[in-house]
């Protein structure tokens, strides 16, 4: 499948492939075209019930339309809906479709599992290995992310420092970002977390990295095909199609995998740094490890 085909809107794919579908698959395809927003919150089994087919037919239909499965189909619809539907309305839709507590728990855990599986499917081992090479060989790692992505950026930098690596992170934008980019040098690695929004800040980040000769790693849901020829490597992190699970879920798992792989490259340095960190913490506790440990005891009984 070409890049244009992989990003073709759902309605366009259905029109082009409808004639080649079985009768049951056509029923599902027509439902997907007419109820695109609704399927963001529905499982394959629920769509099967609504169309009088089955969950297996729903999955086959998604694949016949050129998707890897229902999760990828939902993610593309989510990106298209996100451009036209206000955030407040998307929140209302999530609330209306959440159901009672039992149903809500099932929806959240089901979507989380789907996102992890989809991210695993999209992960290219060669790209992952190259990203680890860049992190392990960098003079310093500079990490960028805003919003919730900024939390993951800070997490990566903090954990790299704990592995004995030089790293820093920022969630600054605009003119404040310029000061953060000034120390960037050749031999550094830049990691950018962005689910799917291409901003001026990202454009400037890539321009600066290219100017000084720093290497670049992009962790994203949908910007890979857009920026793939402008970064050294990009790693997929499947976004939430419905919003039931947080933006940072997939990126956090990708980050944990990277950190473990970097640690394995030099386990002696990682262990030594961990011992130093423990020593510093001991000094902060005044050599008394029980200083900040809550004492167990009987709770006071409330006076009658």
Image (cartoon, grey):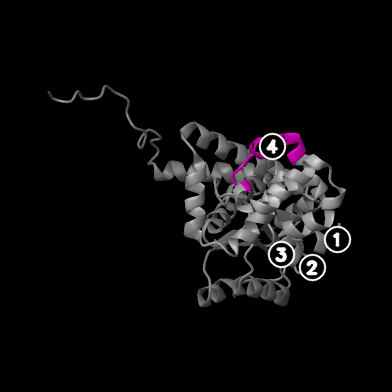
Give the secondary structure at mark 2: loop
Q: Residue at x 74, y 55 (%)?
A: 131
Q: Which residues are magenta?
A: 39-58
Q: Residues within 10 Å of mark 4 (few under 14, many from 20)?
A: many
Please state if 65 lies on the left or on the right of 87 as rendered. right
State yes or no: residue 174 in magenta: no
Indicate which disc, 3 or 1, sits on the residue closer to the N terminus.
Answer: 1
Give residue 233's position: percent from left, percent from top.
Answer: 76, 60
Please state if 219 lies on the left or on the right of 151 as rendered. right
Q: Which mark is residue 2?
A: 1
Give residue 133's position: percent from left, percent from top.
Answer: 76, 54
Q: Residue at x 78, y 43 (%)?
A: 25
Indicate which disc, 1 or 4, sits on the residue closer to the N terminus.
Answer: 1
Q: Quadrant of the N terminus?
A: bottom right
Indicate which disc, 4 or 3, sits on the residue closer to the N terminus.
Answer: 4
Gap between marks 2 and 3 measured at Cα: 11 Å
Indicate which disc, 2 or 1, sits on the residue closer to the N terminus.
Answer: 1
Q: Main secondary structure of the magenta part?
A: helix
Gap between marks 3 and 1 measured at Cα: 25 Å
Residue 192 visible (yes or no): yes
Give the secondary structure at mark 1: loop
> Looking at the image, is mark 2 or mark 4 nearer the viewer?
4
> Looking at the image, is mark 1 or mark 4 nearer the viewer?
4
């Amino acid at each position: 499948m070409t890049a244009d085909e992989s990003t073709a809107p759902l309605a366009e794919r259905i029109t082009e492939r409808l004639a080649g579908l079985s009768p049951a698959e056509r029923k599902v395809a027509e439902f997907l075209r007419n109820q695109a927003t609704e399927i963001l919150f529905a499982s394959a089994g629920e769509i099967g019930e609504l169309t009088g087919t089955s969950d297996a037919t729903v999955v086959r239909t998604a694949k016949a339309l050129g998707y890897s499965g229902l999760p990828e189909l939902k993610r593309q619809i989510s990106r298209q809906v996100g451009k036209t539907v206000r955030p407040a309305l998307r929140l209302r839709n999530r609330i209306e479709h959440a159901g009672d507590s039992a149903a809500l728990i099932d929806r959240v855990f089901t979507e989380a599992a789907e996102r992890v599986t989809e991210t695993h499917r999209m992960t290219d081992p060669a790209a992952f290995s190259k990203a680890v090479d860049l992190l392990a060989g960098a003079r310093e790692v500079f990490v960028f992310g805003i919003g919730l992505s900024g939390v993951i950026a800070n997490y990566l930098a903090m954990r790299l420092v704990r592995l004995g690596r030089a790293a820093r992170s920022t969630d600054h934008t605009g003119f404040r970002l310029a000061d953060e980019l000034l120390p960037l040098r050749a031999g550094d690695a830049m990691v950018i977390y962005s689910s799917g929004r291409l901003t001026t800040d990202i454009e400037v980040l890539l321009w600066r990295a290219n100017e000084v000769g720093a290497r670049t790693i992009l962790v994203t849901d949908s910007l890979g095909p857009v920026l793939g020829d402008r970064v050294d490597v990009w790693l997929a992190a499947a976004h939430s199609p419905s919003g039931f699970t947080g933006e940072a879920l997939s990126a956090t798992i990708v980050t944990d995998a990277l950190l473990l792989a970097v640690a394995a490259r030099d386990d002696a340095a990682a262990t030594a740094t961990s011992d130093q960190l423990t020593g510093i913490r001991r000094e902060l506790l005044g050599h008394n490890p029980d200083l900040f440990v809550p004492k167990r005891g009987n709770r006071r009984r409330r006076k009658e």
